[in-house]
Amino acid sequence: MVFSVADLSKRSFYSVGERNVVETILTLDPAIYFCSVDGEIIPDFCERVRDLPNDALFQIHFRLLGGKGGFGSLLRSFRVNKSTNQLMCRDLNGRRLASIDEEQKLRKWIERAAEREKEKIAKRLVGLCVVLWVDLVLL
């Protein structure tokens, strides 16, 4: 019975005693496969297969040609979508940096409330002075 490559890919392990399988493997181009015995890769399987005992199990691994690429560009696209919003991070106390920033802005706004009130009164007084001056000039 002659095995094809499709038949060889159906099972994982083969015995060296299966001569028809070994003969089929020996007819293949060594560049398309490699074999391992007890987890150790045998680089020159064609020459060493005759030295192995008949009850030894080997595994055949078919090499796959590389794809068309593009995996690196896929990783770069994920890096582009990475969030740069640092305000959603948390500090060591577990508070969000955005809420800490808002709290500082509110403190500054409250500190300047007295200044804003003085400016508002000064604007009213300037307006009243202008109105009184205009009334005095027109009289």
Image (tube, helix red, strand yellow):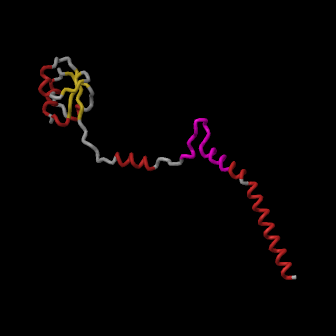
Q: Majority secondary structure of the magenta segment?
A: helix
**Is residue 33 depicted above or below 111 in this figure?**
above
Judge by depth and name the residue closer to the eye, 49 or 40.
Answer: 40
Q: Which residues are magenta?
A: 86-105
Judge by depth and name the residue closer to the eye, 50 or 79.
Answer: 79
Placement of the C terminus among the 4 image quadrants:
bottom right
Q: Is residue 67 left or right of residue 21?
A: right
**Is residue 68 depicted above or below 120 in this figure?**
above
Q: Residue at x 18, y 23 (%)?
A: 18
Judge by depth and name the residue closer to the eye, 52 or 89.
Answer: 89
Q: Total marks drawn?
A: 0
Q: Report if residue 88 lies within the magenta region.
A: yes
> Residue 97's x, y, as percent?
59, 44
Q: Residue at x 50, y 48 (%)?
A: 84
**Is residue 66 depicted above or below 3 in this figure?**
below
Q: Is residue 68 left or right of residue 53?
A: right
Q: Residue at x 77, y 62 (%)?
A: 120
Placement of the N terminus among the 4 image quadrants:
top left
Residue furthest bottom in the image:
138
> Residue 118's x, y, as percent?
77, 59
Q: Is residue 42 left or right of residue 88?
A: left
Q: Report if residue 38 lies within the magenta region.
A: no
> Residue 94's x, y, as percent?
60, 37
**Is residue 121 depicted above or below 102 in this figure?**
below
Judge by depth and name the residue closer to the eye, 64 or 133.
Answer: 133
> Residue 138's x, y, as percent?
85, 82
Q: Residue at x 70, y 52 (%)?
A: 109
Residue furthest right in the image:
139
